[in-house]
Image (spheres, coloured by chain):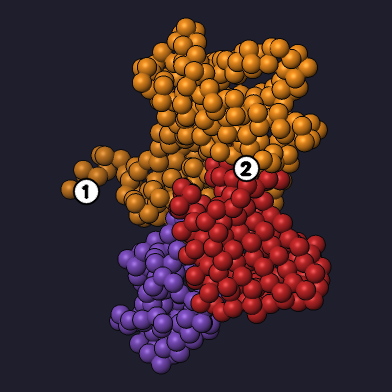
């Protein structure tokens, strides 16, 4: 099932539902990368609040996603990682070091505002 | 009737046609005389002033279950059902205030009552009596052991539960400013406590929407590498929830432990003491603390 | 201390052949873990371990199964997971179990990570015949 992607001013927000399988995640990655280009977005928020498991494949894909979006000139932030999921991840050794994370949508938007301020080109 | 000899190593050597037959006789005798033997047992329990926390009807009901489970264990040579029953029984009677010595006491009394009835039945034939006892004793002892151990294990489980509750109470996560949490850790850190702290902290970060957490370990004397790893994991997990962690009160010993397990202290945000940590946290959050006079002068 | 499991209860077998099956296997594991009274944290660990093992099956062996069941040893109760496949097998188990190793160029979490979070871990593999990984987590 494809993940819905919303446009909010300069940002894209993808909200993942639970029971996401591998192909859905890869599809999301490609859709976001594509849309960032076509819609000239400055930032992407991926909301994983509904995910009850974040395993090594999911983190790899998220990391790739952030990297590819960075190549398109935009920032990515992952929000909504559940406390239990975060704990499981670090115990498994999955740290997602190079990916920005924030508590929730509100914090994610604040983060992107701060980040993109600096990168904003003069009109 | 077969005895599952691999389940009961104690009676492994003596399983042979005639011994199996003896055990069968024994079990049949115990079943036939169930009512009398149970009454005798209940009488001895009261005489020994055991299970005073329970009334007669309750003692009778439990006595019946124990008796039947006992004979069943003798018959089958398997102890899973007995173990399960012992756990279940313990769960019910521990809150009633029944003590370990009472549980051990009543099981031993049952063993005695049954042994006496065997003496009475086989007194005419000393050799046969001996052989019956050879079959009975190891099994009866294993049963007593199973029930006693089951009871003790249940008690230990309850104690652990209570300890968890105490731990939870004794390590509060404090919110001192908006978006700022402080976790002062005092005392002994074991892996269990460390795990509990991490879970509490992460839940706290979410509930309070904290952006910065100050973990103060001034009160922790020493940690082993397991706990040091937990600390590192806590910092990493907090980051996944969007919070920055500042660790304060790092003693030279603990710093050494962290270095030894390969932690790059340069990557961990550490400040000397709690005061300094809070100031750094406020700075990160964009707070500026000014003296009262200066503030009022501006008004 | 190796467990002497009594007859496993509530055994559930999930065939694994596609990434949709991963979702099912994770869910079954979580359900069983919660049934046993594991905390959400522990249940998440179990579900994540299942995800890793099931994904390895799909990636390397195309097809296999995940079996979850409750086990006990004395008064301990726990969850047991067996990940079985008839795939190519692992050529060098020691290499696969080394921290940081990964054939898919990923994070190298895989097996060492799973072993770290479980209480018991056993792996048996025959090249050309298949792999069986058995893990157990006891309730504290």
- Rendered location of residue A50, percent (x, y): 39, 67
What colour is chain A?
A: purple
Q: Chain of mark 2?
A: C
Q: Residue at x 61, y 59 (%)?
A: C81
Q: Residue at x 56, y 38 (%)?
A: B81
What residue did someone put label 2 on?
C73
Q: Residue furthest left?
A: B299
Quarter of the image holding residue B120? top right
Q: CA distance from mark 2 to mark 1?
A: 71 Å
Quarter of the image holding residue B104? top right
- Compare residues B22 and B178 and report the one nearer the observer: B22
User: In the rendered image, is residue B21 in sight?
Assistant: yes
- Rendered location of residue B200, percent (x, y): 43, 45
- Compare residues B209 and B105 and report the one nearer the observer: B105
Q: Residue at x 38, y 77 (%)?
A: A14
Which chain shows up in red? Answer: C
Count of labels in the image: 2
Q: What is the number of the mark on residue B298?
A: 1
What colour is chain B?
A: orange
Is residue C101 rendered to the left or right of residue C45?
right
Q: With respect to residue C124, does B252 lie above or below?
A: above
How crowded is the residue under tag 1: few (<14 C-alpha within 10 Å), some, or many (20+)?
Answer: few
Is residue A83 rendered to the left or right of residue C87?
left
| Badges 2 and 1, same chain | no
Q: Residue furthest bottom?
A: A38
Q: With respect to residue A102, does C19 lie above or below?
A: below
């Amino acid at each position: 099932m494809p993940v819905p992607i919303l446009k909010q001013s300069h940002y894209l927000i993808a909200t993942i539902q639970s029971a996401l399988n591998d192909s859905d995640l890869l599809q999301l990655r490609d859709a976001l990368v594509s849309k960032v280009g076509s819609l000239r977005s400055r930032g992407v928020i991926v909301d994983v609040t509904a995910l009850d498991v974040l395993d090594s494949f999911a983190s790899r894909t998220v990391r790739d996603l952030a990297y590819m979006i960075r190549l398109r000139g935009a920032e990515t932030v992952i929000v909504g990682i559940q406390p239990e999921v975060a704990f499981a991840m670090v115990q498994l050794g999955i740290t997602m070091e190079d990916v920005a994370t924030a508590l929730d949508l509100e914090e994610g938007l604040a983060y992107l505002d701060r980040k993109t301020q600096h990168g904003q080109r003069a009109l | 009737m077969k005895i599952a000899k691999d389940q009961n190593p104690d009676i492994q050597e003596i399983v042979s046609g005639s011994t199996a037959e003896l055990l069968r006789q024994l079990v049949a005798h115990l079943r036939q005389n169930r009512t009398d033997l149970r009454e005798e047992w209940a009488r001895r329990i009261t005489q020994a002033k055991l299970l005073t926390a329970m009334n007669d009807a309750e003692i009778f009901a439990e006595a019946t279950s124990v008796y039947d489970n006992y004979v069943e264990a003798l018959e089958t040579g398997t102890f899973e059902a007995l173990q399960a029953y012992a756990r279940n029984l313990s769960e019910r009677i521990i809150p009633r205030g029944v003590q370990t010595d009472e549980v051990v006491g009543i099981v031993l009394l049952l063993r005695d009552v049954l042994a006496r009835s065997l003496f009475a039945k086989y007194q005419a034939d000393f050799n046969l009596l001996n052989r019956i006892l050879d079959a009975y004793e190891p099994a009866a002892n294993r049963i007593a052991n199973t029930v006693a151990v089951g009871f003790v294990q249940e008690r230990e489980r309850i104690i652990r539960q209570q300890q968890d509750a105490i731990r939870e109470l004794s390590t509060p996560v404090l919110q001192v400013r908006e978006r700022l949490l402080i976790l002062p850790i005092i005392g002994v850190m074991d892996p269990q406590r460390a795990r509990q702290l991490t879970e509490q902290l992460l839940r706290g970060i979410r509930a309070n929407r904290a952006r910065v957490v100050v973990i103060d370990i001034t009160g922790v004397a020493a940690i082993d590498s397991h706990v040091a790893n937990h600390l590192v994991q806590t910092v990493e997990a907090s980051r996944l929830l969007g919070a920055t962690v500042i660790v304060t009160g790092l003693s030279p010993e603990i710093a050494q432990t962290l270095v030894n397990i390969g932690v790059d202290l340069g990557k961990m945000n550490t400040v000397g003491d709690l005061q300094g940590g809070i100031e750094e946290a406020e700075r990160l959050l964009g707070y500026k603390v000014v003296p009262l006079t200066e503030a009022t002068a501006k008004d | 201390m190796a467990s002497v499991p009594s007859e496993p209860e509530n055994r559930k077998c999930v065939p694994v052949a596609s990434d949709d099956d991963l979702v099912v296997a994770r869910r079954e594991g979580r359900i069983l873990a919660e049934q046993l009274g594991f905390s959400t944290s522990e249940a998440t660990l179990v579900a994540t371990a299942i995800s890793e093992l099931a994904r390895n099956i799909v990636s390397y062996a195309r097809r296999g199964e995940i079996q979850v069941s409750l086990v006990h040893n004395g008064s301990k109760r726990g969850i047991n997971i067996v990940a079985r496949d008839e795939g190519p097998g692992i050529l060098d188990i020691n290499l696969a179990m080394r921290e940081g190793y990964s054939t898919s160029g990923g994070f190298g979490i895989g097996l060492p990570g799973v072993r770290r979070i479980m209480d018991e871990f056993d792996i048996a593999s025959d090249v050309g015949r298949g792999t069986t990984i058995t893990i157990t987590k006891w309730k504290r």
